[in-house]
Image: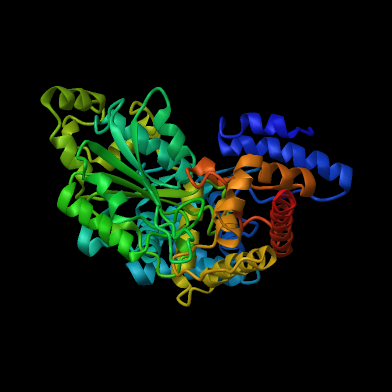
Amino acid sequence: MRRYNFKEINDVYGKISPFEFKDKLIKLAKFRAMESGRRVLDAGRGNPNWTAATPREAFFTFGQFAVNETRRTWNEGDLAGMPKKEGIATRFYQYIYDNLNMPGANLAKDIVDYGIEEFDFDPDSWVFELADAIIGDNYPSPDRILVHIEQIVTKYLIKEMKYDTKKGGPLSIFAVEGATAAMCYIFDSLMANELLRKGDKIAIMTPIFTPYLEIPHLPRYNFDVVFINADEIDENNNHTWQYSKKELEKLYDKSIKALFLVNPNNPASIALDENSCNNLVDVVTNHHPNLMIISDDVYGTFVPGFKSLMASLPYNTIGAYSFSKYFGVTGWRLGTLALHENNVFEKLINELPDDLKASVNKRYSDMSLNPDKISFMDRIVADSRMVALNHTAGLSTPQQVQMAFFSAFALIDKEDNYKGVNISICKRRQKLFYDALGVELIENKNDASYYVIFDIMKWATNNYGEDFANFIKDNYKPADMLFKLANNYSIVLLSGHGFFGPEWSVRVSLANLDDESYTFIGNSIKEVLSFYVYTWKKNK
C-alpha cells in the first residue's frame, strides 16, 4: 500500500498497460481505505462475483464416482488403479441411485443421459471417457480435445455463438487454457506457418482488449497496425460503438493480412450490429477474400441472440471463446479455438512460395511423413507445445470434463434460465450505475452490459457545451478522474483510453461487485463531475 500523489500517477498514465496502472490505483485506494475506514471497490477487472454452482456440484459428485472406480480395480491404502470401461455405465447409474442426495447427482445423470440420447453415444464409452478424464491418469488423447467431449462442446458453441456447420462445414475444436492462451497460440501459429511475418500489416477493430494492442508491437512481431475504429455517433452525440463503412473500407487494402476483433467489444461490451456485420461481410467477400479473421467472442453469451462473425464468415474466421465470464470460472482456465475444416488459413499455406512451404513442412516433419497434409488446427495444437512435445499437448483432461459439464448444463437448460440470471445481474447493475450517475440509460439489444465505458468529454459536451469540455481539457488531465476516485472514494476503475477508446473515458466492470456498489460508484463519479462544473462556473 502506498499513497501515490497525482504527479506520480499521471507520470505513468498511458505509458504502461492499464492493468499495470490499475495496480498502482489499488495501492492508493487501499491506503486511503485504511485511513478512512472505507472498503476498496475494485471495478477495474472483469472477474465475475458469481459462479455456476450446479455443474460444479455435478463435476465433484461424478469425480467421487470416478475415484470409487479406481479403487474397484486396485485398492491398496492410498494407492488405487485406473477406471475400467466394461460395465462402467451400469455402475454409474447404480452409484447415482444409491447417492441421489449428493449435490449435483441429478445433473450428473442428466449429462450422461444427454450424451446417450442426443448423440447416440455408447454408454460405456461415454462414461469411461468422463471417468478416466476426471481422474486425469492419461495424457489427453486426441490431444486437441477428447472425442465425446468435443461433440458436446461443439453443440454448445453452435447454440451460443451460432457457428454454422451447414454454411461452413465441419468444425474442429481445440480445448485451451482460456481465451488468453488462445490468443498466444494463434499469434504463434500464424507466424510459424508464414501466414504472418515480422513487420506485416494487420488490422485491429477498436476499442479492444489491451493485449491485442500490445502483442503486435512485441519485437518478435513488430506488426504494422491499421486501426478500424468504432466511429459511429447517434443523433444525440453518443457513441454507438459501431463501425462506419468508411472505417471498414480500410480493409480493401489487400496488404492487410489479418483482422483481430473482440465481439462484443471490450471495454464497451457492445456486439457488432447487423449493419456493421453486413458491411464487414461485404468488404471481405467482394474486396478481400483472403483476409484472415480472428474473432474473440468471450462476452457473446451475455447478448440475447448473439451471432459470432464466424457464423457469417466461416471460411475466413477462427473463433476464440472462454467459459470464464459466463460460468464464473476464470481460475479454471477453460476456452476453445474453433475453425471450420474448409478455411482460408489452409488455402494460404498451400499457396506459400516453395521455399517457405519447404521450411514450414520441415517444422512439422517429425509429426508426419506428409507434413503438408497436417491441418492448420492440428498445427496450432503442435505449436502450443513447440511441435516436439506434441505428444503431450492438450488441455488437462479434468479441465475438459468441467468444460463438458458446463456445456451440457447449458444445453440441457432449454429455457435458458441460467442465461437469464446472468443477463439480469449485469442489466440490474448497469441501471443502478446510470441512475446514480444521473445519465439516461439507452437501451441497446447488442449490449452485453458486462462493462460500461463512460466518456467524460461526451458527457461534458452534451450537457454543458464545448466551452465546458475545453475547460476540463485545459485544467485537468485524463488521469484526474481515476486518481480522484481512488484517492477520495477508494474506487478503482480502468482508463478506456488504454483500450484505444476515448482519451477521457473510464471503464467500469459491472460483474465483480455487489449491486449497491454500483450506486456508490455512480454517485462518486457524479460528485467529481459536479466538482468540474463548480470550478468551471466559478472561473467563468
In this rendering, does residue 507 appear at all?
no
Q: Nearer the viewer, residue 332 or 3?
A: 3
In this image, 151 relative to 322: left or right? Answer: left
Relative to residue 503, is residue 438 depicted above or below? below
The residue lying at 19 percent from left, 40 percent from top is 254
Quadrant, the N terminus: top right
Give how far across and how far down residue 49 sits, in percent.
Answer: 65, 57
Q: Is residue 158 visible?
A: yes
Residue depicted at 43% across the width and 33% down the height: 215
Q: Quadrant of residue 59?
A: bottom right
Residue 42 vertical placement versus 164 (above, below): above
Q: Residue at x 79, y 41 (%)?
A: 30
Q: Horizontal and vertical percent for residue 181? A: 45, 40
x, y percentage for residue 468? 61, 52
Above or below, 24 against 95 in this view is above
In the rendered view, does 473 fall on the left or right side of 230? right
